[in-house]
Image (cartoon, rainbow, N blue to C red):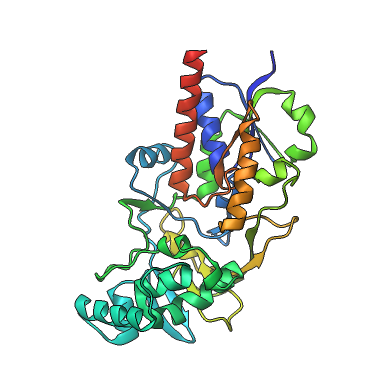
Amino acid sequence: MKKYDYLIVGAGLFGSVIAERLTSAGKRCLVIDRRHQIAGNTYTEKMSGIHVHKYGPHIFHTNDREVWEYVNRFADFNRFTLGTVANYRGKLYSLPFNMYTFHQMWGVIWPDDAKEIIDRQRKDANISNPKNLEETAISLVGTDIYEKLVKGYTEKQWGRSCCELPSAIIQRLPVRFTYDNNYFNALYQGIPVGGYTQMIAKMLKGIEVRLGIDYLEHKGELDALAEKVVYTGAIDAYFDYRLGHLEYRSVRFETEILDKPNYQGNAVVNYTDREIPWTRIIEHKWFEFGRDENGVELPDTVISREYSTEWRPDDEPYYPVNDEKNQRRYEQYRMLADKERDVIFGGRLGEYQYYDMDQVIRQVFNVVQKIKANERTE
């Protein structure tokens, strides 16, 4: 008998949740990660008393009550809801697209007036059956908003023309004809008090975790430790890129501590024109309302400028480029993965899919349910 039932590759959200769920079901789990930290891209570290989202902002949002109750077992959540500001050449607009945005853009007050302008601009652009992101965006919000708030930001983020990008990217953003600038259409929202790292640490309490270990470099000896493997890394890397590289976008951050209590007055400000090289500036203290865990106002602030870059093999892969070419290649990798009887592929990289955090947790619940069902039939 091997020492562990499951070797879990990756101490991010998927790996940590499945480790907790399997351990609760009586399984022996070992969690490893090539980074020297837990929590994956949700990792937060303290700087000047502020919990800094080191790999970009993560706001937990869900309509899934079971998932919400689950994460609240490991952390208390504050009431933060995201309302983003878009800066286009010094003029500010509300995001996601709502009546505040339409008023700022056109001076309209009534929803019917905003709809009339959008309908007219869609007709002028001669779009009846949108085929890509550009056409979909214009059909949803008109040419003015597309040109000022969508085109530059999106092309910086993805490094591709909007005409080459799939519609699904823009369809993630709400379009509302109400004065509601809450970014997410979710019943439950917030950020863990004390940061995500603390939440993940509670999930992993009592579970063996080894950090700074590259699974693919030591695959043979690590596989020998466990009956099965849960792999949350990049699926193409697992197969040594034998079918070619899948494409990702990567992100880098320039973070600095500022000796002032307030830099931009909002947690996230997007810069939507192409002339500004960064996509957004994050001011981390506002995720927790500018106060520490004891409610004391913090005197300094920490900002991060975020830059989107094309992924290279030594970079961190952040966002799958889910165009037709990459999806075809992923499907080929998925067929290889289906033949790996004792390996479960999961998470954003393991399934080459953009998941929100609640979707990752729901995915884990489904995987564990399937494992239990298979055990009952064996």
Question: Residue 50 in the image: x percent, y percent?
Answer: 53, 60
**Total numbered labels:** 0
Looking at the image, can residue 184 be seen?
yes
Question: What residue appears at the point 37 percent right and 63 percent down from the top-left corner?
Answer: 183
- Residue under the image location 52 percent in, 31 percent down: 20
Residue 289 drawn at (x, y percent):
41, 63
Quadrant occupied by the N terminus: top right
Q: Seen in the image, is 108 located left or right of residue 192?
A: left
Q: Residue at x 48, y 14 (%)?
A: 377
- The residue located at (38%, 67%) in the rendering is 83
Please state the horizontal and vertical placement of residue 306, each as a whole percent of the image: 59, 68
Residue 36 visible here:
no
Work out whether residue 261 or residue 371 is closer to the camera in this orientation and state it: 371
Q: On screen, 113 above or below 166?
A: below
The picture quadrant where one finds residue 126 is: bottom left
Q: Quadrant of residue 175?
A: bottom left
Camera-side residue of 378 and 107:
378
Q: Identify whether 36 is placed above or below 271.
A: above
Q: Nearer the viewer, residue 166 or 106?
A: 166
Q: Position of residue 374 (x, y in %)?
A: 50, 20
